[in-house]
Amino acid sequence: MRRLVSAVLLILLAGFLLFPVFWVVSTSLKTGPETFRLPVRWLPSPATWQNYREVLADPRVHGYIGNSLVTALASSLLATVLGAMAAYGIARHRFPGRSLLLGAVLLVHLCPNLVSMAALYRLAVNLHLLNSLVGLVLVKGAGLSLAIWLLKGYFESLPRQYEEMAMADGCGSLAIFFRIVLPLRLKGVLVTALFFFAQSWKSFYIPLLLTTRVEKMTLPLGIYQFVGEHGFDAGRICALCMLSLIPVLFLLVAMNRLGWENVRPAG
Amino acid sequence: MFEERNNLPRRPVAGSGVATVGPYLWVTPALAYLLFFWGYPALSAVGLSLTDASLGSEAARFTGLDNYARLLRDSHFWLALKNTGVLLAGSVVLEVALGFWVALYLNRSSRFGKGLLTAALLLPWLFSELVTALTWRWIFHEPFGLLNALLARLGFEGVPWLSRSGTAMAALLAASLWQGLGMSTLVILAALKGIPSRLADLAVLEGAVGWKGIRYVTLPQIKGVLLLDALLVAIKSLGAFTLVYALTGGGPGYGTEVLATYMYRLIFTFYEPGYGSAVGLSLACLFLLLVFLVHLLQRESRDLEAGGAP
């Protein structure tokens, strides 16, 4: 009896988790009139790629996707490089202020710059970073606190012997980092970079804050434009939502291949 | 433990002049960056909250704590605070309790549907906060949404979910649970896998099975992780700006307005960055409190580990 109850509950839960996905897929394959017709149909008949064709033919959407790719790539690179360097410094050295720095990094990671929204906006205005991809990259780069946190433990788990040998051979510390430590820890650094790419690809509120011009919008902000234009343009929104999942899906597969266990937040 | 000690930075050996500035060279770029794009806006938000600044006008006057006094009298602020609390408490209870339950199920060996359930839990991670919000907005749509279609099939009247405060808040909780449950489950599952199997075997021998086993063996072992998970869910729901903004827009009226969206509305709709920053800083206080608790918890678990190591 108890088994039956828990089985039923788990099936309900699986339904709760899967039905939204089903609904988005189904809507994205319907025609406009069919989307807004009562009684609501569960499945599209006939299924059509019309929504996908339309959004992919829209030059604005090309811009959204291009902007998203560029900013995600650049901010992931920025956050990973600066974050990896800092994580290495923290992992390998004791210095005054080290634990204070770690505390500050945790604070920055957990407390988003959402809370200083107006000040951030002013800063962007003063630096002429409104409606600029560079501005998006720079502001998003603050996520590097997470990279420090993820990579610190990962660098600590690297035996010191490699670096000591290299040092004995007269290698400088920059050379040691870039030619010994990074290659030996490449997987984890890559996973971190991919993770950041996904985060940035998904981000909405910073682009919302800093962008008003259509040609500088990233994909999430672009999708949101379809909400206002003609009411809730469900078919096209769902098609765009499905398209926006594709890169994240690839990243998830790649991260799985590289191994999640390579990167673990330091305790 | 051992590893940590082995890898502790040693005293610099040679070329000590370089070694003492060395660590700072590594952390300075990141530190300078964070100071400029995180620290400076945070500080200037404090300054801004003490003025009657409005966007575009340079003639902001210093008004001391006026904005904070206004907070106390502002009924919309209190409503937003209450809604933030409801969303936070609801998310924590739902995500931790359900996450614990699902993790227990997944932790047992060879159960039916494990793979499917895991996939279903991970799938929402592909969805960004915005896409999640829009997906659920479409599900709750009146009259063309999935949920009303389901009700119609069962012979009920459709409900205008997003035009009533109570059901709109429930919609936010559902969307938040949908996206957060997978993470919560994975965190708890990892902790369950960490319980030594001899402890579980011993518990079974002692007759602690089923609910008793959970109550006296499992729960005490993963108490710390459950607390940490609860704190992380709480922090996530404090920062759930996009979800609220794109799903309900804080509406109907101010019915589901949370602190984050109220701040945005003040700054970008009413052009009151000064007062909006005061709201933002009150939100920051809540963040600080939770981050401090995370810090305490981490320190405690580290101490326990250090004391408990053989």
Image (cartoon, rainbow, N blue to C red):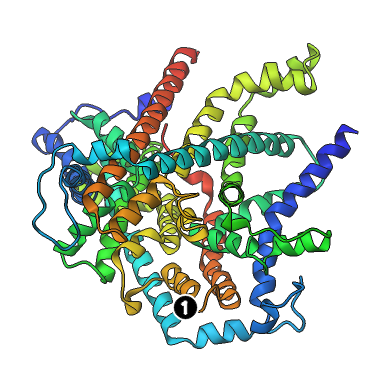
Image height of A67 relative to A124, above or below: below
Would residue A38 appear left or right of B169 to someone viewing this image? right
Residue B232 in the image: above or below residue A18:
above
Residue B213: % across, % down: 74, 19
Residue occupying the point 77% across, 73% down? A39
**Quadrant for the N terminus of chain B in the image:** top left
Residue at the spot x=59%, y=72% of the render?
Answer: A238
Front residue of B149/A136: it is: B149
**Residue A257 or B66: which is nearer the viewer?**
B66
Label 1: element kind: helix
User: Does residue B89 appear in the picture of this structure?
Assistant: yes
Indicate left or right for B130 with B19 as reference: right
- Binning the other alpha carbons within 10 Å of mark 1 as few (below 14), some (14 to 19) or many (20 upward) gives few
* Nearest the eye: A12 or B22: A12
Percent x, y for residue B65? 18, 36
The answer to whether residue B90 is left or right of residue B105 is left
Image coords of residue A50 (percent x, y): 62, 86
Above or below: residue B9 compared with residue B122: above
- The residue that appears at 53% across and 24% down in the rendered structure is B224
Residue found at the far right of this picture:
A1
Q: Residue at x 34, y 46 (%)?
A: A112
> Which of the 4 image quadrants contains residue A111?
top left
Q: Which residue bears the numbered disc 1? A: A229
The amino acid type of the residue labelled 1 equals Glu
**Residue B127 visible to an observer of this rendering:** no
Residue B144 coordinates in the image, percent (x, y): 67, 69
Q: Nearer the viewer, residue A261 or B2?
A: A261
